[in-house]
């Protein structure tokens, strides 16, 4: 069984890595690029690299389906395919946004419709949710029509907002999906485990190209999909509280930005360090910049990876029993 897990993880990694080798030069040739604003010369970097993440993730899920079909590997295909449809729907929204820029309010609403397969899935099964210190609570229709769509929408938008620095989104995603994979395995949530494991392999490969100095950006197709995959997996595996806790740094970032009317940009590059524009904190990243009196991009990302790792350790301690 361990061999199957390893093969699924590595297959996702290999497909993503190989696809990026082909994709990056073609994205640049097609002019699908973005400026790396936190570098002195603001180089043009290939955008929409998240397509490769989705490719690796999808290939790995197809491998799981093949193992089920031809080798008797047991997994709930209905749940797995529902999860795949949700992630693909969110990725499609991200692709459209990367190409023609969807208004923010529309992008915040569209993921609600992507949640339909999960609504149908849970409607035919359980509408309960495990709450800390309370236990299982049956929310009925409220869970189906409100909590599931909100979960997909909020998670995908949160991971899309705490972004914009080399290696940040992929690095935090690697930690999130590592912890989520461990807990899904611990809880015997097989479908969730393979969703997380497949996305983890793809993110590890992507990180090698996205870390400082980045050769490719994930684009909205990548950042939206991180949150969507996490939300999909925790909903299918009845691990909603775990998913919410793992996104705590993103929640903090959201509320800081909400207090500042959701600004798009809030830092400036000076002498190798990043500073909040006008000394004003417009997001979690700018708060770290201000507290450190300027910080390099590499160290800023390391701070957030450390924060996410700390959150991950706490979540593991809370739920591994």
Image (cartoon, grey):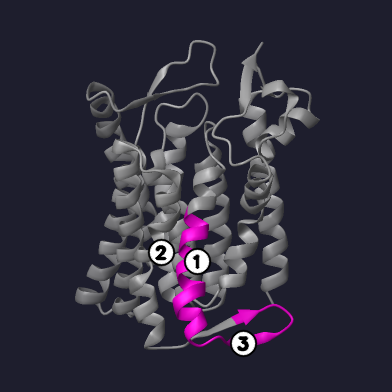
Residue 77 falls left or right of residue 150 = left
Q: Nearer the viewer, residue 321 or 152?
A: 152
Residue 159 falls left or right of residue 135 = left
User: What element does badge 1 sit on?
Assistant: helix
Which picture quadrant has residue 26? top left
The residue labelled by disc 3 is 136
Which picture quadrant has residue 281? top right
Where in the figure is residue 113, as x and y percent of width and height?
35, 65
In this rendering, the answer to whether 71 lies above or below 16 is: below
Q: Residues within 10 Å of mark 2 (few under 14, many from 20)?
A: some
**Which residues are drawn in magenta?**
130-156
Residue 45 falls left or right of residue 252 = left
Where in the figure is residue 259, as x and y percent of width and height?
68, 44
Q: Nearer the viewer, residue 251 or 74?
A: 251
Q: CA distance from mark 1 to mark 3?
A: 19 Å
The residue labelled by disc 1 is 150
Q: Nearer the viewer, residue 19 or 106?
A: 106
Q: Residue furthest left?
A: 70
Which picture quadrant has residue 48? top left
């Amino acid at each position: 069984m361990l061999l199957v897990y390893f093969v699924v993880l590595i297959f996702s990694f290999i497909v993503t890595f190989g696809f990026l080798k082909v994709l990056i030069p073609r994205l640049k040739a097609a002019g699908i690029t973005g400026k790396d604003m936190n570098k002195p010369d603001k180089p043009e970097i290939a955008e929409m690299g998240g397509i490769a993440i989705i490719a690796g993730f999808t290939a790995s899920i197809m491998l799981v389906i093949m193992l089920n079909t031809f080798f008797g590997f047991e997994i709930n295909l209905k749940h797995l395919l529902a999860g795949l449809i949700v992630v693909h729907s969110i990725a499609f929204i991200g692709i459209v946004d990367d190409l023609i820029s969807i208004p923010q309010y529309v992008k915040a609403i569209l993921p609600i419709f992507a949640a339909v397969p999960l609504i149908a899935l849970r409607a035919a099964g359980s509408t309960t949710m495990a709450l800390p210190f309370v236990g299982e609570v049956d929310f009925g229709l409220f869970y189906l029509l409100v909590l599931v769509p909100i979960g997909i929408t909020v998670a995908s938008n949160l991971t899309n907002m705490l972004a914009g620095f080399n290696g940040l989104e992929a690095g935090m995603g690697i930690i999130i999906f590592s912890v989520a994979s461990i807990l899904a395995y611990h809880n015997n949530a097989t479908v969730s485990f393979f969703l997380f494991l497949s996305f983890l392999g793809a993110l590890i490969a992507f990180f090698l190209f996205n870390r400082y100095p980045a050769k490719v950006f994930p684009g909205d197709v990548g950042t939206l999909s991180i949150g969507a995959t996490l939300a999909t997996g925790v909903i299918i595996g009845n691990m909603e509280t775990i998913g919410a806790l793992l996104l705590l740094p993103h929640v903090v970032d959201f509320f800081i930005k909400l207090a500042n009317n959701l600004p798009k940009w809030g830092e400036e590059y000076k002498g190798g360090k990043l500073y909040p524009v006008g000394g004003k904190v417009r997001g979690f990243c700018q708060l770290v910049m201000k507290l450190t009196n300027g910080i390099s991009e590499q160290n800023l990302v390391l701070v957030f990876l450390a924060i996410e790792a700390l959150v991950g350790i706490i979540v593991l301690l809370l739920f591994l029993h």
